[in-house]
Amino acid sequence: MKTKEAIRKLLSINGSSLEIEDIVNMARKLDDRKTVLSKDSVIRMECSDNFKNRMIDTKQPIYGVTTGFGDSSRYQISPEKTADLQLNMVKYHLNGTGPTASDDVIRATMLIRANCLAKGNSGIRPVVVHQLLEYLNKDIIPVIPERGSVGASGDLIPLSYLASAIIGEGQVKCKGQIRDIKEVLDENSVNPIVLEAKEGLSLINGTSFMTAFAVLAVWDAKELAFVADLCTAMATEALMGDRGHFHPFIHQVKPHEGQLESARLIYEMLSESRLARDKILSLNNEFEEKGYQEWDRPIQDRYSIRCAPHVTGVLRDTIRWVKQWVEVECNSSNDNPLFDVNSRHVYNGGNFYGGHIVQAMDSLKVAVSNIADLLDRQLELVVDEKFNNNLTPNLIPRFDPEDYESGLNHGFKGMQLASSAITAEALKMSGPVSVFSRSTEAHNQDKVSMGTIAARDARTIIELVREVSAIHLLVLCQALELRGVEYMGDKTQAAFYLVREQVPFVDRDRRMDQDIQRVVELIKTGRLRNVVGNV
């Protein structure tokens, strides 16, 4: 009998209750839980497999089981050939190209595919999923190239590498090294699986690869939403802007949930600040005499500050519905054909189609890219002496005119250039991929989703926007150190000191590429959000 502690360290999958947080924790090894197949799933899978075998015995034509694939489905084979058909199908899809997917993407793919099959509608034996989970628990992960999927009939090519590992062929990564799987299985006393009818198709005919990218993108986009609000608060301080732009009254009368959340966070982060102001301007005595007066700055801040909750709020609201869609996909039978044990029917359909994933990722891409554009515009205000309210040009430290260093340094001029370039790259990639359907496979797959490409693009855009955010944070810390750290709010000050633990003040020109990467890690790992605390 398992102890309570042992149960807590198990993630039991049943095809219906897997959440994004579970997948991220497993994919990025944030906890030490092992994954097991639930008893109910084992029963459902056995029933489905038995029903499939009875159908084969009656020599019924079953797509991908006793027939060929795609436009070859008009050819029926005898029951004796069904296992060989599965093996051939896995092999002829092993033609992926491009970079190898990251370890966290592959682990997420393995867990999601196992969970989809655990619903028990795919005619696959439990032993195959047990094998997949054993690989995952031992961190034996197949090497999967990123390119090759059009996102209909699922991720056939990427997932064929997962299936190849199950049958003991190909390369895997184990303990950080890429090795032949046969050696790794021998060392771990694991025997490869011999696939039976439908099992190869069940492994590769789904959306699990694109969904793995989508899961991690949703998780990482949440971190960027927080960082965008933090940057907006710090930019308001650096520019000595108006905290009143984030007052609850404004946003309660346009109550989009994400906008309300971003405005609340920014307002609370500025609550103790002596740099951000509630009222910037007040009349002087000369107004009554002249009938007009000219201020040395506008009565309200520029859009990239004042409208920031309306931009980041869109990302927050997009994440909400995207998360829902992605979790549905993780807990679905995205396969074909499907076996309904209760009605004794085999159904042919298109659940392998990645339509919801591509729409979710195309939308997430746009929302995240807009964060890059927002922060890049804020950065320009902070480094440009025309707009930064008496900070130095490019945040160069103040030198005595007689000092030799005077006139030699250019501060954050190069960082602004880099931010602009990275932002442009993110914006370039943000166009919808779903409209670029390509007819493939002898015009059988004549309308495809392109979900995998969209999800990969979302991953890349998030990486780019993380870099823009890191550059902006470095700029803001420099500006606020020039302005006076002691005047900052407690929460923004906490973020400032965390960055300063990694990156010192720029007192003269130096390379800053490693600085960017250090702050990228603070964002990626959630340390910035943790140090700011509950807001």
Image (cartoon, rainbow, N blue to C red):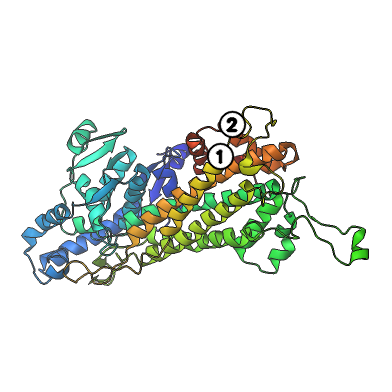
* Residue type at tag 2: Arg
Residue 317, x across and y down, in percent: 55, 62
Labels 1 and 2: the sequence-earlier one: 2
> Vertically, is 40 above or below 504?
below
Residue 164, x across and y down, in percent: 19, 47
Q: Secondary structure at mark 1?
A: helix
The image quadrant that residue 54 belongs to is bottom left
Residue 403 visible somewhere in the drawing: yes
* Residue type at tag 1: Arg
Residue furthest out toward the front? 402
Residue behind mark 2: 508
Q: Is residue 313 left or right of residue 440?
A: right
Disc 1 crowd rating (10 Å Cα; few below 14, some 14-19, many 20+) is some
Mark on residue 197? none
Q: Secondary structure at mark 2?
A: loop
> Vertically, is 492 above or below 302?
above
Q: Is residue 317 left or right of residue 293?
A: left
Residue behind mark 1: 527
